[in-house]
């Protein structure tokens, strides 16, 4: 398949599949599965960054500029999150969910709208990152898309819970989340058009992709795991993180054959 076909398929399948699976979890009222999904997502993100994305970026570009792109990316995502344009919530006790549990209806609807706007922007950026990865290498694109889908699942479960608690019906929550997921396809197609003729930018886009995944894993997901400090939970988290890393390794090797 061509790079464009891979990008379209990965962004469409990734966006829609993550929303549908998250809807199953949320509608079945099983939020206790979310911490396990988060642990697994941490492993896939870290595995994708250190086993695939950064090695490819360093292969195509010079070390110092690639490292600078990672650093700049981390700072940009920090600022975007501060502006509430980049918001990842994976459990009911996070800041956004704390807002939505207020008793005022206006607060409820504002939280739901904020989730949808932030998720749409997030999906659009993910689509661009997937496009850049596929333009660099098909194997890298597959691994990047897989890692993004894995971390989308717990986020989408959290988003569904916020929307339901904000007064959205199940059908409306599903519709708006599916609509938001199409931003990933738009980002992927626009990213392909913008980047197809600029291969020299690929290493630095990969650096930004790596910084995005590192930021989500280290600044957003891992702190939530520390809320369960008991030994049994820690062992479970380590095993699931290891399983996520192992999956990326297996997929990377298999797709490279």
Image (tube, rainbow, N blue to C red):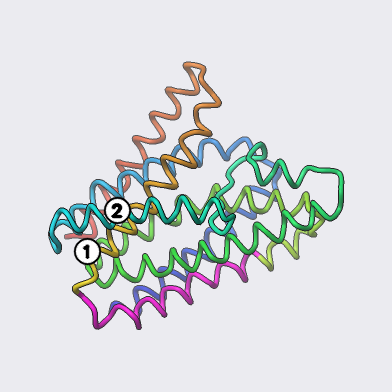
Residue located at (16% from left, 56% from top): 58
Label 1's element?
A: helix
Q: Is residue 109 visible?
A: yes
Instruction: Please check the rendered image and state whether residue 183 is part of the magenta-colored stretch, yes or no.
Output: yes
Residue located at (45% from left, 41% from top): 219
Q: Which residue is mark 2?
A: 70
Mark 1 or 2 closer to N-term? 2
Whether 142 is drawn above or below 253: the answer is: below
Contact between marks 1 and 2 (CB within 8 A): the answer is no
Left or right of residue 206, residue 22 in this image = right
Residue located at (56% from left, 67% from top): 181
| Residue 208 figure quarter | bottom left
Q: In x, y percent, where is residue 125? A: 45, 65
Q: Which residue is mark 1?
A: 203
Q: Is residue 1 visible?
A: no
| Magenta-drawn segment | 177-199
Q: In x, y percent, where is residue 40? A: 43, 40
Q: Nearer the viewer, residue 8 or 63?
A: 63
Q: In x, y percent, where is residue 198? A: 24, 79
Q: Residues within 10 Å of mark 1 (few under 14, many from 20)?
A: many
Q: In x, y percent, where is residue 175? A: 69, 68
């Amino acid at each position: 398949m061509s790079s464009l076909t891979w990008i379209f398929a990965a962004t469409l399948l990734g966006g829609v599949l993550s929303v549908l699976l998250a809807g199953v979890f949320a509608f079945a009222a099983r939020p206790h599965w979310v911490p396990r999904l988060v642990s697994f997502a941490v492993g896939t993100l870290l595995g994708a960054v250190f086993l695939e994305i950064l090695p490819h970026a360093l292969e195509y570009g010079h070390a110092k500029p690639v490292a600078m792109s990672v650093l700049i990316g981390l700072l940009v995502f920090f600022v975007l999150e501060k502006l509430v344009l980049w918001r990842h919530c994976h459990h009911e006790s996070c800041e956004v969910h704390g807002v939505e549990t207020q008793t005022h209806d206006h607060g409820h609807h504002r939280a739901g709208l904020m989730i949808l706007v932030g998720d749409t922007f997030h999906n659009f950026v993910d689509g661009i990152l997937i496009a850049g990865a596929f333009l660099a290498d098909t194997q890298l694109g597959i691994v990047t898309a897989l890692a993004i889908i894995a971390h989308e699942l717990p986020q989408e479960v959290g988003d569904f819970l916020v929307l339901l608690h904000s007064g959205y019906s199940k059908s409306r929550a599903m519709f708006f989340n599916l609509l938001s997921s199409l931003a990933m396809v738009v980002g992927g197609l626009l990213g392909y058009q913008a980047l197809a003729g600029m291969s020299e930018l690929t290493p630095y886009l990969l650096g930004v992709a790596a910084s995005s995944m590192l930021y989500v894993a280290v600044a957003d997901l891992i702190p939530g795991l520390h809320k369960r400090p008991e030994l049994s939970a820690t062992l479970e988290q380590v095993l699931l993180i290891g399983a996520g890393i192992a999956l990326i390794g297996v997929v990377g090797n298999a797709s490279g054959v």
